[in-house]
Each structure stands twice: as C-alpha cells, then as structure tokens.
Image (cartoon, helix red, strand yellow):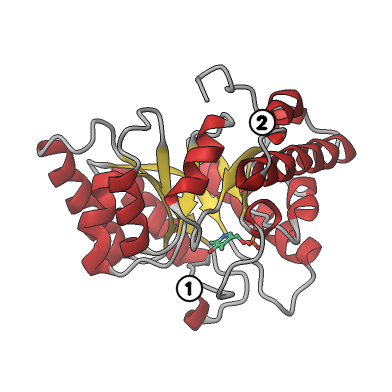
C-alpha cells in the first residue's frame, strides 16, 4: 500500500476492502465511522471536517496501526505507556505518524512519554505538568522532539478525585501554569463523562467550562470529548476531537485501561 491512500473518505478505504482479512475489516469500520461522524456533524449543523477522529489503538497490535496508517490515518491514541513505547519503536518507519497519549499518566513515566508523544491528554495536576515540562525540555535538548509538547487538561465532571481531572479554580491555575511553561503548549481540554450521568448533561457542562477557559486562554481551542458510545452527543456539544476505540478496532480483550 502506498501514500495514495491519504484521503480519509470511504472510496479509498473501499479499495482496500477487497483485500479481505484484518485490512478489509478495518477499512470497512473506518468508512462506517467516518460516515457516522459526518452524520453527527450534519445533525449538529457543523462542517463535516470540523471534528477530528483520533483512533484509539490500545490493546491492538502495531500491525493494525500500520493498516490504518496506510488508509490515511496519521494520529493514534494510546493509553498505556509501556505498550505505547513498544509500538512507537516498532513503527519508527512510518515517518508521518503522530502519537497522542490519552491515558492516566504517572509522573515517573512523564520523561518517556515526552520523548515520543505529540500530545498528552490527561494532565490534571501541577506536579504532572511540571514533570512533563521537564521531560519535554530534556527531549527538545536531546533531539527527540522539535516542538513543544501539546497538553490537554483533563476536566473532572463529577468532582470524584479517584477518576482524575481538575475543575474550577484548580483547572484555571493549571491552565496558567501550562501556558507559562517553556516546553509545553496549552492546546485544550478533555473529559470522560461519569457513567451515571447523561452524556448530554455532561458534555453541556464541559462546553461551558471550555468557553470559560478559552475566554482567558484563546489558544486552548481543542475540546476532546466523545468515544464510541457517545460521540453524537459530544459533537452536538462542540467536541473538536472524538477518541474512538471499540467502534473502529472491535472489542478490546480487557475493558478498561
Ligand atoms: C479507551 C479510551 C477511549 C476509547 O473508548 P471506546 O469506548 O472504545 O471508543 C477513549 N478515551 C480514553 C481516554 C480511553 O482510555
């Protein structure tokens, strides 16, 4: 397969379907998913290209990522540091690939992630932000990266500290800290709605929090919300990036990460 499969739309994907096997399966699922996102954009009165699809490939092999790359995808979401670092090493020949770290991150892994991730999604404490800034600074100095590390702050929508995320004054203080960091770039917000809350209510709350933040930090444009089960609701409430695993890759062997 070649670089000619760059378009994200279904007709290119269909050419690969004839190959059958896993490549055909992923091509079919990708086309269906892009149609679903386009339909959600249309229903919300938004431009078809206004929502970015981030395929979430945790638990799936590097060979699946290579298939999706050859179908034109360039960005991939991973949530487990060790697994992700292994795939980064295996797929170093895919020159335009971009890795986005979407999982909970321990501070002792910040240095490693700052070497290979374009973006980290789950920043919710000043200590983690400081560790990532130091890691990104070292990675810039050592030539592992050439641009600042993009950061999305994770918003807590239920105030449960066990689930991670920041809110209110702590969220704004964290945004100020990241914006002032030398080697980090404040890119936006992400959230995972609590299981016991209607997605519409959760995403509406998130949109209000995002609007308040961008009033102070206009550069924090990204709003990453929506997964396989709730992406329509997230898109209706302004998501700019859906993170989709199951609806593209199939069921994971274990359910959470
Ligand atoms: C696994 C994961 C996803 C994808 O979830 P699906 O329901 O499989 O689409 C999205 N975001 C985060 C943070 C994840 O860990």
Residue 212 at x, y percent in the picture: 59, 50
Residue that protrudes farthest toward the top in the picture = 4
Local secondary structure at mark 2: helix
Residue 244 at x, y percent in the picture: 63, 53
**Residue wearing tag 1:** 164
Tell me which image quadrant ligand 1 sits in: bottom right
Relative vertical location of residue 244 with respect to residue 35 in this rendering, above or below? below
Local secondary structure at mark 1: loop
Q: Tell me which label, 1 or 2, sits earlier in the chain.
A: 2
Residue 186 at x, y percent in the picture: 40, 43
Q: CA distance from mark 1 to mark 2?
A: 40 Å
Q: Is residue 217 left or right of residue 184?
A: right
- Between 138 and 85, the residue placed more toward the observer is 85
**Residue wearing tag 2:** 16
Q: Is residue 220 left or right of residue 91?
A: right
Q: Residue at left 23%, top 30%?
A: 146
């Amino acid at each position: 397969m070649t670089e000619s499969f760059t378009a994200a739309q279904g007709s290119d994907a269909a050419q690969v379907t004839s190959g059958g096997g896993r490549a055909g399966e992923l091509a079919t699922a990708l086309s269906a998913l892009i149609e679903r996102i386009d339909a959600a954009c249309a229903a919300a009165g938004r431009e078809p290209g206004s929502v970015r699809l981030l395929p979430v490939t945790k638990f799936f092999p590097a060979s699946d990522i290579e298939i999706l790359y050859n179908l034109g995808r360039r960005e991939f979401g991973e949530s487990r540091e060790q697994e992700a670092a292994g795939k980064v090493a295996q797929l170093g020949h895919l020159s335009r690939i971009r890795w986005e770290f979407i999982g909970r991150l321990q501070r002792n892994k910040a240095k490693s992630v700052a070497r290979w991730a374009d973006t980290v999604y789950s920043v919710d404490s000043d200590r983690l932000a400081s560790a990532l800034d130091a890691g990104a600074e070292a990675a810039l100095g050592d030539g592992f990266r050439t641009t600042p590390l993009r950061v999305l702050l994770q918003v807590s929508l239920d105030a449960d500290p066990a689930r991670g995320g920041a809110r209110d004054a702590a969220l704004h203080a964290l945004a100020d800290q990241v914006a002032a960091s030398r080697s980090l770039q404040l890119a936006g917000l992400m959230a995972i709605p609590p299981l016991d809350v209607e997605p519409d209510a959760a995403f509406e709350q998130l949109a209000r929090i995002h609007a308040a933040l961008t009033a102070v930090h206009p550069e924090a444009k990204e709003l990453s919300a929506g997964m396989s089960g709730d992406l329509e609701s997230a898109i209706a409430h302004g998501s700019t990036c859906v993170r989709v695993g199951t609806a593209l890759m199939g069921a994971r062997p274990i359910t959470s990460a």
